[in-house]
Amino acid sequence: MKKYDCIIIGSGQAGTPLAKKLAEAGKKTLLIEKRFIGGTCVNDGCTPTKTMVASARLAYLAGQPNEMGVTINGYTVDLRQVKKRKDDIVLQWRKGGQAGLEKTPNLDLLFGEATFTDIKTISVKPNDNGNAQEFKADQIFINTGAKTIIPQDIEGLNAIEYLTSTTILELEEVPEHLLIIGGNYIGLEFGQMFRRFGSKVTILEKSSRLLSREDEDVAEELTSILEKEDIKIYTSAKTTKFKQMADGKISATVIVDGTEQELSCSHVLIAIGRAPQTATLGLDKTGVKMDERENIIVNSKLETSQEGVYALGDVKGGPAFTHIAYNDYIVVYGNLINQQDLDIQDRPVPYCMFTDPELGRVGISESEAKKQGLNYKVAKLPMTSVARAIETGDTRGFMKAVVDPETKKILGVAVIGTEGGEIMSVLQMAMEGGITYDKIRNYIFAHPTYSESLNNLFMALKD
């Protein structure tokens, strides 16, 4: 049995930088990865999907009738080339990340599946089919991420070749009709993407509306945007059965608002959510506690119920974003090596949904402010009133801010629009720096920019 100071399971956006930094700090470190360096973000999430979203946007722009004096006739979508470009970019990041790890002193990299055999002991079955090896360490960090939830209550699902957010990235031909089960962030991004590539797209959402975590006006705006691109959306929809037909099509039995109907499609994407990858870790051998969804429970310092065992990223539940996983690394490394006193309480959770236009969000929503009984006001500006949006020919969406009328602090932001995430980030910086909305109202911004319209956003508020 080989002894290390630190063992990290999973090379995601927390595990990779943590492994390097611990090794550079003199800790003898082992990083175990069962698949590819970079985790979901690099291999199946942010990098490949946003690369393909960019291709889909070009197709959308090429096919749009417009008043801008430019007409493009006869454009085509080559999904094989889209996939090749995506694969090339993914490999660039993956290989770069692996090369950086392999040249780091004090750091060993092992590809295989890790399972606990005791609190601080791990058995690894190497991917090269070699003999299992055992390792021990004083500190262990779990960064195994999450995977697609596959519903177990749909008859016939396992009899069809359904797609997940990972396998859909490998398609080389545009689906004739893509049926998406789940109308949240992943489903909406893929739905718009493949509609723009040329697929007929139908989205089934079990809730009464899309994006149930967002304010109703945000959900309504994005629903309208998607429907205007001829995406069919059913809410209050439950899929009960799939059947593979002789002609290659798939028949789906769906209950919508209590009425059963049959839908025919060529492909099915399962996008109802993601679950932590804890099943094969053998945590029952460790005493590490999990919640009812099998998320690893951590304290504010990201330590589990066992001293010296930490969980970072999606495997611990909570906001499942790359930047949150990376901040988990910042917290753990800062505390253990730099003797800082960092924690994850009350940290901002900005995020973007990369539909087009994109949604940028940070802070509390209007519905959350109402639920908490806060004294608040809402500033809202349609993109039809944003000069930059008018000039670039895309006025879909709006800017929205929830503020405290007494302190004049910004409590939350939602921006639907071109560069929505960038505009949101400007206001996030203001929130972090304590810059009040009345100051932003009178700021000098460069003209003409999207951020310049933050002046007008806050002019709607009367002090």
Image (cartoon, grey):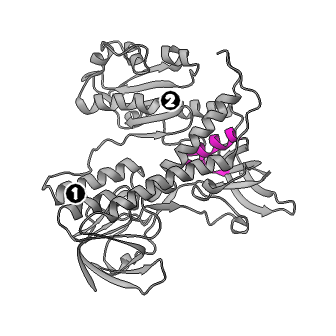
Establish if 310 lies above or below 268.
below
Which kind of residue does numbered mark 1 sit on? Answer: Tyr
Image coordinates of residue 14 in percent, x first then y, are 34, 57
Horizontal placement of 139 versus 220: left or right?
Answer: left
Q: Quadrant of residue 367?
A: top left
Region rendered in magenta: 180-197
Residue 163 shows in this picture? yes
Q: Which mark is residue 373?
A: none
Residue 316 shows in this picture? no
Image coordinates of residue 43 in percent, x first then y, are 49, 56
Measure how far apart labels 2 and 1 are at the Cα level: 35 Å
The first of marks 2 and 1 along the sequence is 1
- Depth order, front residue of 194/424: 194
Image coordinates of residue 121 in percent, x first then y, are 29, 81
The residue carrying mark 2 is: 416
Label 2: how many residues lie within 10 Å, few (<14), some (14-19) or many (20+)? many
Q: Which mark is residue 333?
A: 1
Q: Residue at x 19, y 68 (%)?
A: 27
> Does the magenta run of residues contain 190?
yes
Secondary structure at numbered mark 2: strand
Label 1: how many residues lie within 10 Å, few (<14), some (14-19) or many (20+)? some
- Depth order, front residue of 364/110: 110
- Depth order, front residue of 23/315: 23
> Does the magenta run of residues contain 388?
no
Q: Quadrant of residue 462?
A: top left
